[in-house]
Image (cartoon, helix red, strand yellow):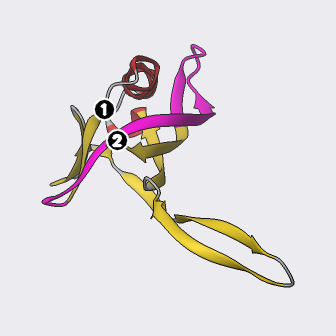
Amino acid sequence: MIVGSLGKIVFMVSSKYIKTIDELKGVDSVNYAEHQIIGSKPKLQFLNVNLQTLTFKIRLSAFHNVNPLAAYKELNDYMKKGEPVRFIMGTRSKGKFVITNLNHDHKKFSAMGTVSVLEAEVSIKEYN
């Protein structure tokens, strides 16, 4: 079952394959100008809506038929190219985003020293 995608990276779950996101968090914010008034409290003036920022975790495991380093490289390549990609969850597009930050943790290694489980936290920002 396809859960969503980020560009050409497809998030899906089946009995033999798991590559999906977890803990999707978002930040929506706005900007205000603060005008100083002599002898009175400042006045706020709405300026604009900021670009949305989303963060999610992904666990890449060889035990679920995913090559952790190759899958991480796909994310890293998108980030380093600054390439805007469509982010889809379920059947709904959330718009175009760029990857702004990747944190990764190599959790498990095989007897040969290759990474068998990698956990990453991915931060993406709305591209307008």
Question: Is-magenta flag for residue 97?
Answer: yes
- Residue 79 in picture, x, y percent from top left: 44, 26
| Element marked by disc 2 | loop
- Crowdedness of circle 2 by 10 Å Cα count: few (<14), some, many (20+)? some
Quadrant assignment for the C terminus: top left
Residue drawn at x 44%, y 27% as measured from the top left: 72
Residue toward you, 76 or 22: 76
Residue drawn at x 69%, y 69% as measured from the top left: 35
Decide: is 73 above or below 59. Answer: above
Q: Main secondary structure of the magenta part?
A: strand
Specify the label residue 127 is tagged with: 2
Residue type beneath disc 1 = Pro
Specify the label residue 110 is tagged with: none
The furthest residue to the top: 112
- Residue 98 in picture, x, y percent from top left: 39, 36
The residue range painted magenta reads: 90-118
2 relative to 126 in the view: left or right: left
39 relative to 78 in the view: left or right: right
Decide: is 64 above or below 113. Answer: below
Q: Label 2, label 1: how many angstroms apart (C-alpha)? A: 6 Å
| Element marked by disc 1 | loop
Specify the label residue 84 is tagged with: 1
Of mark 2 and mark 1, the one earlier in the sequence is 1
Tell me whether the residue at label 2 lies in contact with that at label 1, contact meaning CB atoms closer than 8 angstroms.
yes
Residue type beneath disc 2 = Tyr
- Residue 55 in picture, x, y percent from top left: 49, 52
107 relative to 97 in the view: left or right: right
Residue toward you, 35 or 20: 35
